[in-house]
Image (spheres, grey):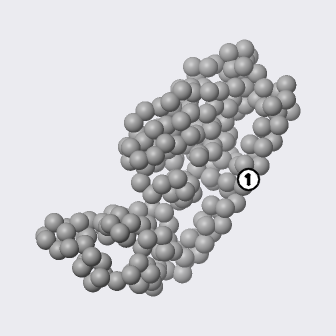
Amino acid sequence: MNEKQYVNAIVKKIKCSGIRKKEIKKQLLTDICTRVKQGEKLDVIISQMGTAKEIADGFNESISPEEKKRYMRNKVLKIVVPIVIVMIFLVLYVYWIFPKSVDIEQSKYFNKEQVETAMKDTVELLDAEDYSALQESAIPQMQTVLSAETMEDAKEALSDDWGERKQFGAVYMAEVIQGNKHFAIGEVTVTYENVSATYRLTYDEDMRLAGIYVR
C-alpha cells in the first residue's frame, strides 16, 4: 500500500462534505510525504498513525452533527440525482431514436458552433469550480444540482484525482424535440491527466444548461 492508497482508504470512511474530504486528503498526504522526505519509512509511518478506520473514526468524532446530516443528505442526493437525470435522458432518448431528432446543421433553433462553444464553456466552468456562473447559465431546475458538494461527489465516482485538463475530444450533437420544446444535446469526451470523462450536456432554446451527465 502506498501513501495515496492509505489516505484514500481513510478519506472514504470520513463522513463529511467532498470539499472537506479534499482538504483532509491534501493535509494527510502533505504530512506523510514530509515525514518520508525526512527519512522515515512509509510502513513505519502507517504503523504509528494507525489503521484507516481508526484515523477516520478520529475525524468523525470531531465532525458536528449538522455536517453529518449534510453528509447523509448529500449521500442520498448522490443516489437520487443520477437516477432523476437518467430518467430525464431516458425520456429524451425515446425522442432521439424515433423521428424526433434533427441534425444540428438543419436546426432552425441551434447553431453548431454556438452549441460546441457552450459545451466547452460549461466544462471549463466545471473544472474551475465556478458554480455561481454555472447556476446563472442554467434553467431553474438545474441550479440546485450545480453545487460544489453535489458535483464533487459526482466527480469522485470516476476518480478522486482527475488532474489538469489536457484536451477536448470530438463533439457530437443533435437537436431533440420533446413535445413543443427543442433541446440541443451534445456529447464530448475530455481527457485529463488521470482520467477521461464523457460529458453529455443539454441546452434549451435559450442556450441555458438544462441537463448534465458525466460518465
Q: Nearer the viewer, residue 112 or 98?
A: 98
In the displayed structure, 189 sits above or below 43; it is above
**Residue 93 seen in this snapshot:** yes
Disc 1 crowd rating (10 Å Cα; few below 14, some 14-19, many 20+) is few
Q: Quick check: 210 above or below 59?
A: above
Q: Which residue lies at the image location 73% right of the left edge and 26% below the top edge?
A: 175
What residue does disc 1 label?
A: 84
Nearer to the camera, 63 or 193: 193
Please report the residue visible at 39 percent of the width from the left and 66 percent of the height from the top. 5
- Image coordinates for residue 107, horizontal then vertical, percent: 73, 18
Q: At which x and y percent is residue 67?
A: 52, 74
Q: Residue at x 64, y 19 (%)?
A: 111
Q: Secondary structure at mark 1?
A: helix
Q: Is residue 84 above or below residue 106?
A: below
Residue at 54% across, 27% down: 170
Residue 119 figure quarter: top right
Give whichever of 133, 110 is nearer the camera.
110
Q: Residue furthest left?
A: 38
Give the quadrant of the N terminus: bottom left
Image coords of residue 168 (percent x, y): 47, 31
Q: Position of residue 99 (x, y in %)?
A: 85, 25
Can I make out residue 148 in this image?
Answer: no
Taking 78 as reference, is 46 left or right? left
Amino acid beneath label 1: Val
Is 92 situated left or right of 45 in this image?
Answer: right
Q: Nearer the viewer, residue 53 or 66?
A: 53
Circle count: 1
